[in-house]
Amino acid sequence: DPEISLPIPARLPEKYVGDMNVRLNLYRRLSTLREQEQVQLMAEEVRDRFGPLPKEVENLFQLVKLRLVLKRLGVTRVDGGQKGVSLTFSTSSKINPEKAAKIVSQHASTLRFISASRLHVTVPRTREDSYLPRTIEKIRWFEEVTS
């Protein structure tokens, strides 16, 4: 699984899911999800069971969605900061280099290669609630260039 280090809170807080065993079971289930639709269904289930999702729980579900995208793209690591995120691709990534270069040139103000296997994605942290969705949207540009 890709290692993700982003400056956002993402968890199931005790005040939202009081029973530790239930929380652990939910985390375990989250780790087994393989499709975006499964993540959405589980988020709806948790909302129905425990009430409106606090921001940190919404973030947790967004991170699971991000992890699925990263796995498909062959990204091994994501590091986030104030100005954006950097992605590290595995040597076995299925990204087509020529098509990736075209995407980067089309979005030069947002994307730039730091090295052959690292890409910087500019995602300013202007609003906390849009950071993760905007990050995922920009990373998904590369789904169309997998070989």
Image: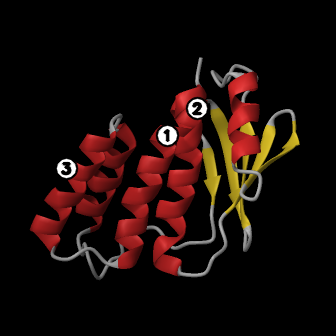
Give the residue displayed 52% in from the left and 30% down from the top: 72
Q: Is residue 6 left or right of residue 59?
A: right
Q: Kindly state the secondary structure of the residue where label 2 is placed.
A: helix
Q: Kindly state the secondary structure of the residue where label 3 is placed.
A: helix
* Marks 2/3: CA–CA distance: 23 Å
Q: Are marks 1 and 3 in contact (CB under 8 Å)?
A: no
Q: Is residue 82 left or right of residue 115?
A: left
Give the residue displayed 72% in from the left and 34% down from the top: 102
Q: Which residue is mark 1?
A: 69
What amino acid type is highlighted by mark number 3? Leu
Q: Quadrant of the N terminus?
A: top right
Residue 29 rendering spot, x and y as whole percentages: 29, 45
Viewer-nearest residue: 119 or 144: 144
Q: Which residue is mark 2?
A: 73
| 10 over 103 or under it: above or below | below
Residue 77 rendering spot, x and y as whole percentages: 69, 44
Give the class, few, some or many, for how many residues have Cα within 10 Å of label 1's Cα (few <14, many ≥20). many
What amino acid type is highlighted by mark number 2? Leu
